[in-house]
Amino acid sequence: MPAVPPDIAERSSTADATDPQPAIMPAGQPAPGVHRQLPDTAPVVIGDVHGCLEPLERLLSSIDAATGGTAPLWFAGDIVNRGPQSLATLRRIIGFGERAHTVLGNHEIHLLGVAAGLRRMRPGDTIDEILAAPDADELVGWLRRRPLALAGDDFLLVHAGLLPQWTVAETLDLAARLQAGFAGAQWCDFAARVMVPPPPDWARAHGEEAQLSLALAALTRLRFCSPAGAPDWIGKDTPGHAPAGTVPWFDAPERRSLATPVVFGHWAALGLMMREDAICLDSGCVWGNALSAMQVHAEVTRRPLFQVKAVPEATHSA
Ligand SMILES: [Mn+2]
């Protein structure tokens, strides 16, 4: 297991990403001249939950208290597996209906692979309760219809990363083709064609299946790549321990998506990272650190951060 830094910032409820002052107006104190707050429709993006339902409930309470309970909830993927309550977490998120959206993470793709008979369960997997549920077909059906990328008003959400050659529009097109394949009636055949070792880089991805296999891998697993965009699929550590000849994907020179902020998870060793062009929200809840979320307004100075510890304070001592 890679070392996950324990130095997650201690934040009990909310704080602004860039301003030391809290971004949330105190309850009952509207700004002068404002009689009724309009609903805030900027999505709150939630990092990798991994079946950690109890911290998710505390985080949702904090989000709802600050935003009025109607803000769209966008999950960064890896909502299931590794943690203690994969099935209940999945049901909770499905239960939000149109309010919640999630992109697929590598753990959802793994689950789909197991469901399709392409993958075996691995040690530490906690997805068996989903596949054994009486309504497993419906649960798997819901998952395989989810997107691999979501466009906000002024940002893009993916689970892991983008290759430097992709524009945001090209990324959304690749993600839509993958989603259509997994949603289709022949989805097991489609999964067998794209859940394969991908070509080594985009320049050598010739043809539909080569492109989609590399797109699936990058969108759900990318961390490091060469400056020219050849992914390294092994390194999981911090950027300071990048495999030789690689950089974090978001630091690749001439990245064509640079003008649009990309929000992602997947990289627990990187942890919470808030830059204008790249925002990582995987703060390692399933490893005992914290669960993070950010309401992503277009304005950089209006992106409140929500964070709860994996274990509640009261039971943390002793
Ligand atoms: Mn992941």
Image (tube, grey):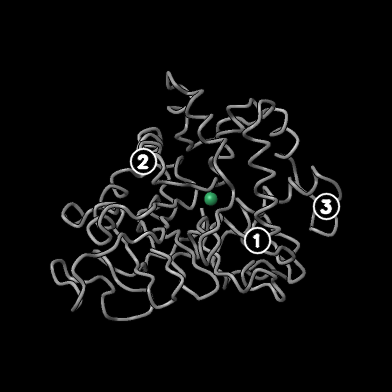
Q: At x 63% / y 41%, what residue is drawn?
A: 179
Q: Which mark, by number, is residue 205?
A: 3
Vertical placement of 186 versus 175: above or below?
above
Q: Quadrant where the C terminus lies? A: bottom left
Report x, y in % for residue 145.
56, 37
Mark 2 — residue? 96
- Give the residue pinned by disc 1: 162
In three-dimensional space, the C-alpha distance between marks 2 and 1, rounded to whole angstroms, equals 28 Å
Q: Residues within 10 Å of mark 3 (few under 14, many from 20)?
A: some
| Residue farthest to the bottom, as pictured | 20
Residue 200: percent from left, percent from top: 79, 55
- In the picture, measured across the screen, residue 316 lies left or right of residue 193, that is left
| Structural crowding at the residue carrying mark 1, measured as other residues with C-alpha within 10 Å and reported as few (<14), some (14–19) or many (≥20) | many
Label 2's element?
loop
Q: Earlier in the sequence, mark 3 or mark 1?
A: 1
Q: Say if disc 3 is inside 8 Å of ligand 1.
A: no
Please tell me whether residue 171 is drawn above or below residue 298 in the rendered image: above
Residue type at mark 1 is Leu
User: Mark 3: which secondary structure?
Assistant: loop
- Corner quadrant of residue 47: bottom left
User: Foreground residue, 9 or 148?
Assistant: 148
